[in-house]
Image: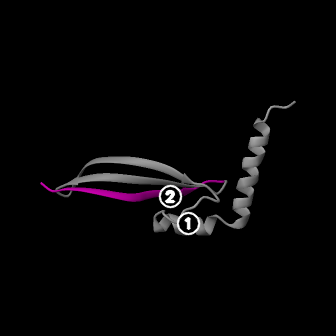
Amino acid sequence: MALEKIQIVDRIEVVENGSVQVRTCTRIIEDGKQISGTFHRHVVAPGDEYSAEDAKVQAICVAVHTADVVAAYQAALEAAKAAQLPQG
């Protein structure tokens, strides 16, 4: 009975604001058959550091996170923050 733990990035999605959503699957394999699996999701927002990400995620971030996308994302964050400030 040999157990093996495998972690793979199995889904990468780019949403409208340029954020890259990443799903990692952790599989437990026993004698060649998957006996367990869990998922973890995280987001790489425009402007975030992504050098520790999977190579596929890095390649997508390089293509998507252009200077214009990062600037638009930061502007949207600032606008949302300003809208939440109390008026007075």
Left-right relation of 59 to 34: right
Taking depth in this image into account, of 11 and 40 the one nearest to the observer is: 40
Q: Residue 11: give x, y in percent of width and height.
A: 46, 56
Examine the structure image and report whether residue 2 is included in the region drawn in magenta.
yes
Q: Residue 29: give x, y in percent of width and height.
A: 23, 54
Mark 2 / mark 1, whichever is N-terminal: 2
The residue to which callout 1 is attached is 60
Taking depth in this image into account, of 30 and 71 the one nearest to the observer is: 71
**Who's the residue at 54% across and 56% down the image?**
13
| Magenta region, main secondary structure | strand
Contact check, label 2 and label 1, Cβ < 8 Å: yes
The residue to which callout 2 is attached is 12
Left-right relation of 30 to 73: left
Q: Residue 71: give x, y in percent of width and height.
A: 74, 59
In the displayed image of the protein, which residue is found farthest to the right?
88
Taking depth in this image into account, of 49 and 61 the one nearest to the observer is: 49
Q: Secondary structure at mark 1?
A: helix
Q: Residue 30: give x, y in percent of width and height.
A: 19, 53
**Who's the residue at 60% across and 58% down the image?**
48
Three-letter residue code for mark 1: Ile
Quarter that holds the C terminus:
top right
Left-right relation of 35 to 51: left
Rendered position, 27 above or below 51: above
**Who's the residue at 34% across and 52% down the image?**
26
- Quarter occupied by residue 3: bottom left
Q: Secondary structure at mark 2?
A: strand
Crowding at mark 2 (Cα within 10 Å: few <14, some 14-19, many 20+): some
Range of magenta residues: 1-16
Three-letter residue code for mark 2: Ile
